[in-house]
């Protein structure tokens, strides 16, 4: 298991960059906290980790060897050579706090439905 020291205050429902990880919290995390990263068995372009502190589930962490775009409310991993329109997609995880889509051989996208009411409505309709 990996660990990560939080150096800045983390607000929930936004993606933060902590190279080589990207952190998405479900609740605020105070600075100077050390969190544990527990790998999840999810197959996609991200390695996804459960973020815990003293057995409390705080959020998710993402790591990728591919190109990553962090838009604050979304996180996308993709390979430049396969960039473009996807032939298929699947939902890997859907909670009120986060939705993760996989586009096989193209990319993976994690979206925060809590940041924007419009995004939440679009995701509910899909």
Image (cartoon, grey):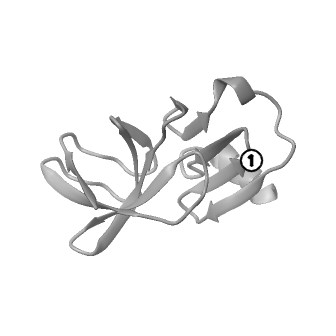
Residue 46 image position (x, y, % from top left): 53, 47
Tag 1 residue = 104
Up the image or down, 42 lies above or below 103; here it is: below
**Left/right of residue 37 with respect to residue 15 in the rendered view:** left
Residue at 73% over, 53% down = 123
Instruction: Return the residue nearer the eye: 106 or 9.
Output: 106
Instruction: Return the residue nearer the eye: 31 or 4.
Output: 4
**Residue closest to the far top:** 80
**Left/right of residue 17 with respect to residue 102 in the rendered view:** left
Up the image or down, 66 lies above or below 100; here it is: above
**Residue closest to the far left:** 32
**Left/right of residue 110 with respect to residue 10 in the rendered view:** right
Up the image or down, 84 lies above or below 101; here it is: above
Instruction: Return the residue nearer the eye: 61 or 33.
Output: 61
Residue at 59% over, 44% down = 116
SS class, disc 1: loop
Residue 24 image position (x, y, % from top left): 42, 50
Label 1 crowding class (10 Å Cα cut-off): few <14, some 14-19, many 20+?
some
């Amino acid at each position: 298991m990996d660990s990560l020291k939080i150096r800045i205050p983390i607000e929930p429902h936004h993606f933060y960059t902590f190279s080589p990880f990207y952190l998405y919290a479900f609740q605020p995390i105070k600075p100077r906290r050390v969190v544990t990263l527990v790998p999840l068995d999810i197959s996609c372009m991200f390695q996804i980790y459960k973020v815990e502190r003293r057995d409390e589930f705080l959020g998710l962490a993402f790591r990728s060897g591919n190109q990553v775009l962090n838009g604050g409310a979304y996180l996308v991993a993709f390979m430049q050579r396969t960039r473009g329109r996807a032939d298929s997609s699947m939902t890997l995880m859907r909670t009120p706090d986060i939705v993760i889509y996989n586009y096989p051989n193209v990319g993976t996208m994690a979206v925060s439905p809590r940041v924007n009411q419009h995004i939440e409505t679009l995701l509910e309709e899909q």
